């Protein structure tokens, strides 16, 4: 499909800025959607930086495999479209120092045929669940005077694409949530930052599952989707790797990244530079 693969060899900025090989030792983290893709990479990276990470996902079997033998890691299965399960997750995981709201899903259709139940589920998982987790977990961060809330949004939190009305709306809302909570946390003092990460298309199962839908809706061959749709707006014509997003999240956890609170860090391969 004409897409370069493989991660770029980067110095881990989160380690350099915070100092030492395990700058997050003693910190507790919760990562949602941690069974695959970006969430898996983020949870594993934070663990490598010394944090005690709770992996959460809807798939308990995948969580068990990932956390088996991983020092200090825990696993909590939860369906984030169900409010009671989100609240249970917050109780069982908390208190945490780092919250990464990453869980997401996708559904594509023109707005006039977009199913209401799909709209409700996407908004519940990608906007209501982050709100509920922040609401439950930020008080303990206030008490300790340190915290990192990182919302994995998307370039679609800043711009739109057709046929993704629920996803785009949820990601735009997630940026609004990020900015609002950042202002509230700043007023409380302490070293608490609230940020968002906004990548363009990342090489994940979620993106791979879109290929058939993109081809169906646009009337093109599946083999053409990556070049003609996923990478069309990128200045650099390659998919982002999950590990590259994970390193950005690690950077935002560093003490020296406090000034980025309220910001949306774009990892868009030049999409928005046009």
Image (cartoon, rainbow, N blue to C red):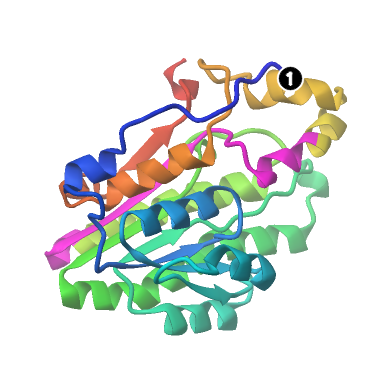
Left or right of 215, for residue 18: left
For image coordinates 52% across by 54% down, the residue present is: 39
Q: Quick one: 26 or 81, which is closer to the camera? A: 26
Stretch of the chain drawn in magenta: 186-211
Left or right of 185, for residue 174: right
For image coordinates 80% across by 56% down, the residue present is: 115
Q: In the displayed structure, would residue 84 be above or below residue 215?
A: below
Q: Position of residue 72 (x, y in %)?
A: 39, 71
Residue 120 part of the magenta segment: no
Q: Residue furthest left?
A: 189
Q: In the displayed structure, would residue 45 be above or below residue 129?
A: above
Quadrant containing the N terminus is top right
Mark 1, residues whose alpha carbon is within 10 Å: few (<14), some, or many (≥20)? few
Q: Quick one: 77 or 65, which is closer to the camera? A: 65
Residue 259 visible in the shown view: no
For image coordinates 60% across by 75% down, the residue present is: 77
Left or right of 184, for residue 124: right
**Total number of numbered discs in the rendering:** 1
Residue 123 visible in the shown view: yes
Q: Quick one: 41 or 177, which is closer to the camera? A: 41
Q: Position of residue 214 (x, y in %)?
A: 78, 33
Residue 209 part of the magenta segment: yes
Residue occupied by mark 1: 1
Secondary structure at badge 1 equals loop
For image coordinates 45% across by 27% down, the residue present is: 8
Quarter occupied by residue 82 = bottom right
Q: Position of residue 51 (x, y in %)?
A: 33, 63
Quarter occupied by residue 222 = top right
Left or right of 266, for residue 226: right
Q: In the displayed structure, would residue 60 be above or below residue 98?
A: below
């Amino acid at each position: 499909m004409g897409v370069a693969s493989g991660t770029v060899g980067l110095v881990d900025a989160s380690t350099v800025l915070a100092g030492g090989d395990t700058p997050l030792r003693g910190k507790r983290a919760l990562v949602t959607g941690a069974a695959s893709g970006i969430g898996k990479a983020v949870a594993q990276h934070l663990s490598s930086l010394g944090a005690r990470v709770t992996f959460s996902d809807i798939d308990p079997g995948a969580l068990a495999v990932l956390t088996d033998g991983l020092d200090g890691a825990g696993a909590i299965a939860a369906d984030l479209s169900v409010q009671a399960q989100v609240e249970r997750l917050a109780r069982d995981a908390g208190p945490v120092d780092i919250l990464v709201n990453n869980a997401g899903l996708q559904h594509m259709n023109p707005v006039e045929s977009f199913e209401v139940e799909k709209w409700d589920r996407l908004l519940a998982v990608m906007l209501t669940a982050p709100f509920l987790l922040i609401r439950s977990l930020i008080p303990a961060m206030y008490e300790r005077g340190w915290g990192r809330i990182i919302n994995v949004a998307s370039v679609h939190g800043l711009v739109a694409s057709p046929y993704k009305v629920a996803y785009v709306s949820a990601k735009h809302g997630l940026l609004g949530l990020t900015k609002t909570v950042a202002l509230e946390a700043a007023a409380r003092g302490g070293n608490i930052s609230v940020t968002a990460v906004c990548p363009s298309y990342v090489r994940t199962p979620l993106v791979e599952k879109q290929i058939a839908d993109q081809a169906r809706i646009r009337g093109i061959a599946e083999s053409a989707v990556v070049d003609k749709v996923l990478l069309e707006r990128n200045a650099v014509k390659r998919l982002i790797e999950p590990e590259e997003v994970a390193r950005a999240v690690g950077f935002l956890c560093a003490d020296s990244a406090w000034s980025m609170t309220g910001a949306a860090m774009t990892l868009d391969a030049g999409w928005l530079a046009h």
